Image (tube, rainbow, N blue to C red):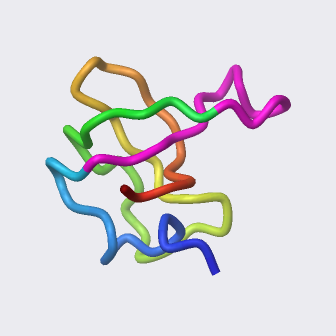
């Protein structure tokens, strides 16, 4: 199971790879540092939604 689907694995300041809404079909990964965790539930099957420091928002697919 992908570590990005559990909120407990995500912390602010973490280096992650997310998929932006417009990249969901292609699965293109955007890397960045977590600024805010937007998903309130403890887990989400498609990944926890976060905002990166550059302002982009997407679901976590990879943790570096």
Q: Is residue 18 magenta?
A: yes
Quick one: which residue is furthest to the front in this view? 64
Residue at 33 percent across and 35 percent down: it is: 51
Residue at 49 percent across and 73 percent down: it is: 3
Q: Nearer the viewer, residue 61 or 40?
A: 61
Q: Nearer the viewer, residue 24 or 37?
A: 24
- 38 relative to 64, above or below: above
Residue 40 as seen in the image, left or right of residue 5: left
Q: For residue 47, which quarter of the picture?
A: bottom right
- 32 relative to 39, above or below: above
Q: What x and y, as percent, mark residue 56?
A: 40, 22
Residue 26 as seen in the image, left or right of residue 59: right
Residue at 47 percent across and 43 percent down: it is: 17
Quadrant of the image for the C terminus? bottom left
Quadrant of the image for the N terminus? bottom right
Residue at 59 percent across and 29 percent down: it is: 20
Q: Which residues are magenta?
A: 15-28
Q: What x and y, as percent, mark residue 14?
A: 23, 52
Q: Is residue 24 magenta?
A: yes
């Amino acid at each position: 199971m992908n570590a990005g689907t559990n909120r407990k694995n995500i912390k602010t300041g973490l280096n992650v790879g997310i998929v932006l809404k417009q990249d969901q079909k292609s699965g293109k990964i955007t890397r960045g540092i977590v600024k805010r965790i937007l998903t309130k539930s403890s887990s989400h099957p498609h990944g926890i939604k976060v905002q990166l420091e550059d302002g982009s928002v997407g679901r976590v697919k990879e943790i570096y």
